[in-house]
Image (spheres, rainbow, N blue to C red):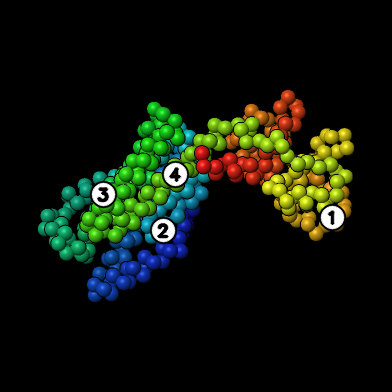
Amino acid sequence: MGVFAGIPVKIHWTFGFIIVFIAYISYRDNLSLAGAGWMSITFLMLFTCVVLHEFGHALAARKYGIGTLDIMLTPIGGIARLKSAPQKPAHELVIAIAGPLVNLAIIILTSVYLFFSVDESLISGLQENYAIDSFQGLMFYLLIINVMLFSFNLVPAFPMDGGRVLRSLLSFRMNKLRATTIATIIGRIIAVIFVILSILFSNISLGIIGIFVYLMARQEFTSVKNQFRVENSFVKDLMRKDFHFFYTDDPIQKVLDVFNSTPEKSFLVYNVEHQLEGVLHELFLRQIKFQNPTEPIGMLVSQQFEYVQEDMRVQQVLEIMQKNGYSILPVTKDNQITGVVDRNDLLRFLYKKN
């Protein structure tokens, strides 16, 4: 769609359904060409407000040194994908509230305009006929749209901004995991209320929103729980002291036998003096299966690795492995290798149930 303020704005392919929806409504209600045009302008206005809302988040995040990958526009709203999550409660509060504040600003501006330029008869006509056939009518619906966006986004449930505002306020008094737990419980309660109301009033849309909110609340809790574990755990909590290793003169076939028969996929390799020579990374081993199996592995050993300490945080190790593409790292204590940590160890640690 374009790049604004250095941030790419993209349209998801499903956005095309909006055009189909407009055409369907126009045909169903037998709208004139002008009527269909006004309705198209209304939808364009709605999604312009959504984009502005997301830019509120993105520009607030930029203030704290957090970049934005892009803003994606979908039929159900916009998404500003930040490159990283804010770490301080105050930063999250400002970033979360910035989007709704954009809508509030539009509400104030349109209210002032309507107060001085529109009489009550026009508003009454719009409320009765729901038809837009003038600029004043368009401004009235711009006001309504932003009141809805402002109110809906401040519902204290993920993924709405209100859920993040609530968590940031709670985070001033407790850690982020505890704050997220409370915020997601409140969000799930609200989601259940939405579903109950959808049944009582036969409103399918409200029920879909309730289910979506419930699932997103659970996803947010899982994500924060995993992040909290990573930030507050150490290498010694997940390292393996029992691991296979090889010597430079071992044949390739010996390595492949272990590779194919055990969960271990990356290995340390020592020289004849039992000094660490290098490593065999998983991706490389998957590519050498058609090499001569009797050849020694010495010429295949990679020097691309780093030593990590037992008392290093898991977050640091994760960043090292992601940045450099390592699949295994030797762990040391007092200059002695005491174990290894590999990519599979990290994945098991990240996704374990408790």
Q: Nearer the viewer, mark 4 or mark 3?
A: 4
Q: Are marks 2 and 4 in contact (CB under 8 Å)?
A: no
Which is more N-terminal, label 1 or label 3? 3
In whole angstroms, how far apart are the C-alphas of marks 3 and 2?
Answer: 20 Å
Which is more N-terminal, label 2 or label 3? 2
Q: Are marks 4 and 1 in contact (CB under 8 Å)?
A: no
10 Å crowding of disc 1: few (<14), some (14-19), many (20+): some
Residue at 13 percent across and 58 percent down: it is: 124
Name the secondary structure under disc 3: helix
Residue at 53 percent across and 36 percent down: it is: 229
In whole angstroms, how far apart are the C-alphas of marks 4 and 1?
Answer: 47 Å
Give the residue pinned by disc 3.
147
- Give residue 211's position: percent from left, percent from top: 36, 53
Give the residue pinned by disc 4.
220
Q: Which mark is residue 293?
A: 1
10 Å crowding of disc 2: few (<14), some (14-19), many (20+): some
Q: Nearer the viewer, residue 250 or 141?
A: 250
Which is more N-terminal, label 3 or label 4? 3
